[in-house]
Image: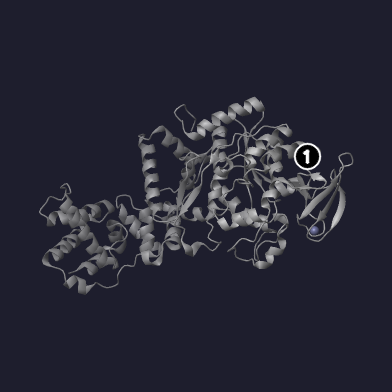
Amino acid sequence: MAQSSTETDWVSRFADEVIAEAERRAPGKPVVVASGLSPSGPIHLGNLREVMTPHLVADEIRRRGIEVRHLISWDDYDRYRKVPAGVPGIDESWAQHIGKPLTAVPAPAGSAYPNWAEHFKAAMVEALAELGVEYDPISQTEQYTSGVYREQVLFAMKHRGDIDAILDQYRTKQKPGGKKPQQKQVDEAELEAAEGSGAAAEDDGSSSESGYFPYKPYCASCGKDFTTVTSYDDETTELTYVCAEDQFTETVKLSEFNRGKLVWKVDWPMRWAFEGVIFEPSGVDHSSPGSSFQVGGQIVHIFGGEQPIGPMYAFVGISGMAKMSSSKGGVPTPADALKIMEPQLLRWLYARRRPNQSFKIAFDQEIQRLYDEWDKLESKVTDGSVLPADAAAHTRAVRTAAGELPRTPRPMPYRTLASVVDITAGHDEQTLRILSDLDPTTPLTSLDEVRPRLDRAENWITTQVPADQRTLVREDADTELLSSLDAEGRESLRLLVDGLDSHWSLDGLTTLVYGVPKVMAGLEPDAKPTPELKVAQRTFFALLYRLLVTRETGPRLPTLLLAVGADRVRKLLAA
Ligand SMILES: [Zn+2]
């Protein structure tokens, strides 16, 4: 779909700004946007904003026919800081690897991947493919160990005095968010531990008696970064370091040495300049002075570059991730979200909110309402009544410049699908029968028509809905309850049972269940509801739920009746 002047959503506005800035900074070159991800453990669903924000902007630029690269830097040459809790296949012995690059730490036991970083990257790579995110991956391990940044490293060492002077302006101030603005798992204890362990100093390099050096080697003996540079010769590039872990020391020629990296606060702006990044958002913790984004904005000039346009994005929360599915230390990942929702829905959540707006991704009942809202939007798009900004968000959700994302051919309501698989416990034949009854005029011929949405709904029911909220249809009638009913109660059930055959569709049964209390009140079936009638309807519905599923609530009644089947409904309601 072509862009138009009516697409005035935040993505379009950033795209305008980024294109103009790219034209000013590097005319004729592809526009570069960037994200950074640290595979230090399971990558949190909240961190997806780090990728989706530039993705949506890059995609808009691409739709306009302008060449654009979305770089995703895997910060896999960062040090292993701590052993994350709750990760299967590891134990305390992984602590012995703290201080090594993430690509030098063994993967959890049983992993198909060669190291820690690759193991945790893999799930994210898969999720990004499903989400239609097109990007150029950059492994910082590969970049550093192959000497790609050699000149930048030597340059930074040569200008260490200038870098030190910039960093020094902030050293006495409060230290805000250091490492790249990722929404690591929200873990106050972890943050405190990091502060206390000297992680703050590690972000900008530390000074020794021989001065300040923005570069840290990984020790040749133990492979860790407990090293201090003790001397450096600008002429010969001879660098001597000593390791605090094992007292190992050696002198290397930095012009030939590839086993170390620039400290974070220098590394990041170096890459902005090196790659010519025009747009790279970061977390709100980076809005304060002294944060690596702010300091980087000064340091980048030393490298002859400019700071990217960098909106601060707000926190993305999760609602109701069930405990039973938190096998990965309670950290929901994008892959977890994609198990219960289609990629379009997840893309839409990001597209419709400006980066500075926080929102939640629903793993609880809220997901049903969200899907209702999404379906309503789709029908507005179809009938042309959609507002321009909503249309833009919809377009960004369902397709990228490369084309439309695979979609469910017949998107029946998620809430209905969830109710049906809840009742049938995933029995395919039964599910097909019930779904066909929903709209008898155009019955479903195969469950493939409702996939993958059906599978997502089924995953949601089986992994996120607690057992006590699942629906169990009664085997036998509750004779005790039935015999306790007064004449009015019996009559209402008789009206319902008598109407089943002539109302056997979703719409028909909806009319029937709301209609019975009206008839009982002496009203016409299409009468407007009064407060008294609403009370009568609620009472009637509660009775039906108790008789059918032994609870006061459950899936919507028309869906439940269809799912239970007319014969069984008669059996359970026969007073
Ligand atoms: Zn060592």
Q: Quadrant of the C terminus?
A: bottom left
| Color encoding of the figure | one colour
Vertical order, 400 against 129 (above or below)? above
Q: Residue 23: percent from the left, percent from the top?
A: 63, 26
- Which of these two is toward me, 540 or 506? 540
Number of labels in the image equals: 1
Would you say 571 lies left or right of 63 here?
A: left
Vertical order, 56 against 506 (above or below)? above
Work out whether residue 71 can be spotted. no
Q: Which residue: 36% across, 59% down? A: 420
Residue occupied by mark 1: 160
Task: State the residue lying farthest toward the right.
Answer: 236
Q: Residue 285: percent from the left, percent from the top?
A: 57, 44
Would you say 284 lies left or right of 456 here?
A: right
Mark 1 is on which residue type? Arg
Mark 1 is surrounded, within 10 Å at the Cα level, by few (under 14), some (14 to 19) or many (20 or more) other residues, namely some
Task: State the residue lying farthest toward the front.
Answer: 172
- Which of these two is toward me, 286 or 100? 286
Work out whether residue 305 can be spotted. yes
Q: Residue 39: percent from the left, percent from the top?
A: 64, 53
Q: Quadrant of ligand 1?
A: bottom right
- Which of these two is toward me, 455 or 311? 311
Task: State the residue lying farthest toward the bottom.
Answer: 480
Mark 1: which secondary structure?
A: helix
Q: Residue 280: percent from the left, percent from the top?
A: 60, 38
Would you say 492 lies left or right of 341 here?
A: left
Task: State the residue lying farthest toward the left.
Answer: 522
Q: Is mark 1 within 8 Å of ligand 1?
A: no
